[in-house]
Structures are given as structure tokens and as C-alpha cells.
Image (cartoon, grey):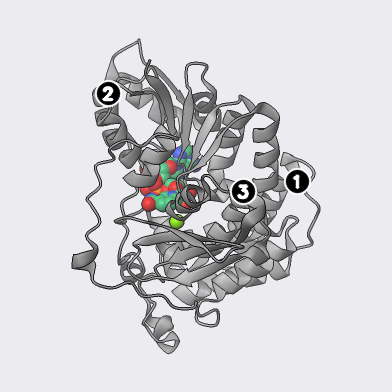
Amino acid sequence: MTQKISILGCTGSIGVSTLDVIARHPDRFQAIALSAGSNLDLLLKQIHQHHPRLVSVKTEEEAGQLRKLLDDPSIEVIYGSEGAVRVATTDEADMVVSAIVGAAGLLPTLSALQRGKTVGLANKESMVIAGELMRQTASRTGADLLPIDSEHSALFQCLQGNRKEDVKRLILTASGGPFLNRPRSDFDSITVAEALQHPNWSMGAKITIDSATMMNKGLEIMEARWLFDVIIDKISVLIHPQSLVHSLVEYRDGSVMAQLGVPDMRVPIAYALSYPERIESGAESLDLFKQGRLDFFEPDFEKFPCLALAYEVARKGLTYPAVLNAANEIAVAAFLEKKISFVDIEKVNRKTVEAHHPKKVTSLEDILEADRWGRGEATKNL
Ligand code: NDP
Ligand code: MG
């Protein structure tokens, strides 16, 4: 029987890689529902290749446009946040790949978990802002939550067959991004084009900027905290510029397990899709002879204050992570639009977090409210 997959964010970098893996295994997977944003050209190509029954786009107008272009009443076209939620919860889907960027991914991802669907999670922001709620929901409905983020997939793989009580430390590797070797005194002159040049990974714009500020690793420690139910003090970051060791788990006996591979997101995507089996992903073999060396360094928290701020916020908990995430989304969007400088991203984030009066999270509404507040405050701080 084929496994039926819904994809949230099908037109993004992760969405495209997911459809590539699916296309390699037509007897095994079928993409039955797709949720895009506004990239109708790409969506149309995906529809012609994969024949989903349900498709969602961002706006009503885009839905109208797409219906005309398709001229096929057997494909249902819906839109907006409710559209994405329907793609995530459609009865037919056995699994949902969550790959919308930002907090916009939260409602559909949470809805999928509420329905008991297996979720392959790329959308780290939902885990950062609502990790506890997502965990509780998954355990209540029995939904499996499988990581797609490469570091978390590596940790998940290194945890297989071991007991959680024996874990001493989770070690997330980080490439260090394009400015690892640029002096901090030159950060004022960083351009958008330079920040978009990631040395090892080809990804969407937002996560690429997050990698340049190292906020991405900050979000990832919070993602790991909730995915694996491990306290923040047991999660550390290791700079590894080659991005071949994707993360490590240290156990109490001194053993350290690592997962390696070429930097290709199809590897963690394929593992989430086929777990606990393994299938071909299309990735190249890792040739360590050719690579020659693996380097590791400690992160520089002064040079990358976003990482330090994320650790502070992760320890504080409450509504702080939702506010930091919201501020960062606003700041990164403003940087990409050339409204603020690269170093302004960290300033907007800190100022917003410092102005926040935190609240205990007892419901989804508390998170959504903190997200709204963070966006408003960050916009004032631009
Ligand atoms: P992209 O920017 O490439 O893609 C984002 C996708 O989300 C697109 O399909 C876009 O639609 C859609 N989208 C954006 N906003 C909305 C919205 N408001 N409602 C509905 N759909 C929306 O991002 P990535 O694929 O790079 O990243 C996706 C997620 O995966 C992020 O959370 C990121 O942190 C995470 N991730 C990504 C990795 C990577 O290698 N790319 C690695 C690890 C994690 P459209 O383009 O049609 O407008
Ligand atoms: Mg990652």
C-alpha cells in the first residue's frame, strides 16, 4: 500500500526536496495534498507531476487564478490558513511534511498532530514557540513527530536503540555560516547578498539569514529541547564548518555517537518518510578520503549574540521563545528588504525580548498572543 503524504510548504526548498524523494519511490509514496504560498508556476508543475487531489494557496485570488489555470474540477483548490489546515488534516493523509517557514506553520502542524497524523517536522519555528503543546498533543493522540531538520534527524538517528536516561549531552553541529571567519568589526558592512551565500546548504531565504546570524542554531537548541525532552543545559553547540557531521549524542559511559553524510536535505527527509526503514534518497556518497579533514571549534557567543540570546530565552521559557521568534521573523524580513542592517537583527531581537512581560503558557492562545505582541513590538523597534 502506498503511503499518502500531505506537504505544507510544497514550493519551498524542503517541499521541493520532499517531492524529489517521493518521485523516486512511486510505489511507496503518493503526494495527495499540497499547500503552497504564492508560487503558482512551481505549484502548477508539481500538480502536473504528482496529481494531488487537494491543493491550497495563500489567497482567495490566487486560488481563483489556479482553478482557471488547472481547468480540472477533480482537483480541489482552497486557500489561506484554513486551506493549509485542511491539507494537514485531510483524512486520506497518513503523514504530513511540515515545511512552511515561520510561525505560520504552527496551526496546520498542530492540527495534524491533533488528528493523530505522523508529522515530519522541518518547520522548527512551531516547535520553538509551542514545543510543550506540540509534545503534549502528540502524546495524547499518539501522533509520531519525526525530525527533518538535519541536526535533529542526526540526533534522532544517534538515539536509536539507546535509553534516554543514559544520554549525557546532545551536541548540535553548526557550520558557522558565511561569517564564521569575518571579523566582527566588519559586520556593519554585511550585505543581503553576502548573508544569502551559505557555504554548504542551499535553503530558503529566512533560514539562510538565520544561519548567518546563528539564530538558526539558537532556534535549533529549543527545537531539540522539545523534540527530545532534554533540558537546555544538556544541549551544546559545536562549530563544524564542513557540515558533514550533522550532530552527536554523548552517553554516560563516554561513548559519543555521530551521524555523518553529505549536506543534502533529502537524507533526513527520506529517513522521516521511511522510518524506521531506509530508502534511497538521491544523495551522493560521503567520500571522506576526498574530504580529508573534519574541523571542530567552540562557538563565539560574543561575535554571534543571537545565539547567546537564544540560550537566555530558552532557559527563561514562558512566552519568551514565542516573542524572540516573532521579533526575529520581523527583523529578518526587514533585513531582506534592506530596511535594516545585518547587526540590527540582533538589536531588534534583544530590545523586543527585554521589553516583554512574560506569561506562563497554558493554551495555544497564550502563544498566539505572545507572537502578535512580539511582531508589534519588533516592528516598533526596527
Ligand atoms: P522556503 O522559504 O524555501 O519555503 C517556504 C515554503 O512555505 C514555501 O512553500 C512558501 O510558499 C510557503 N509559505 C511561506 N509563507 C507561508 C504562509 N504564510 N502560508 C502558507 N505557506 C507559506 O523555506 P525552506 O524550505 O528553506 O524552510 C521551510 C522550513 O523548514 C523552515 O521552518 C526552515 O527553518 C526549515 N528547515 C529548512 C531547511 C532547508 O534546508 N531549507 C533545513 C532545516 C529546516 P511560496 O514559496 O509558494 O510562497
Ligand atoms: Mg538545521
Between disc 1 and disc 2, the foreground one is: 2
Distance Cα–Cα, label 1 vs label 3: 34 Å
Identify the amino acid type marked 2.
Answer: Pro
Q: Which residue is mark 1?
A: 366
Distance Cα–Cα, label 1 vs label 2: 42 Å
Secondary element type, mark 3: loop
Q: Which residue is mark 3?
A: 163
Secondary element type, mark 1: helix
Q: Which residue is mark 2?
A: 26
Please, which residue is most extreme toward the left here? 290
Distance Cα–Cα, label 3 vs label 2: 35 Å
Where does ligand 2 appear, by image quarter?
bottom left
Task: Tell me: is circle 2 under 8 Å from ligand 1.
Answer: no
Q: Residue at x 54, y 24 (%)?
A: 89
Query: Looking at this view, is 291 or 366 the one in front?
Result: 291
Query: Looking at this view, is 212 or 146 the one in front?
Result: 146
- Does 356 sit above or below residue 158? below
Q: Measured from the top left, where is residue 240 in percent x and y?
A: 39, 70
Instruction: Say which quadrant the N terminus sits in.
Output: top left
Secondary element type, mark 2: loop
- Say few, some or many: other residues with alpha carbon within 10 Å of mark 2 (under 14 / 14 to 19 / 20 or more): few
Please, which residue is most extreme toward the top here? 74
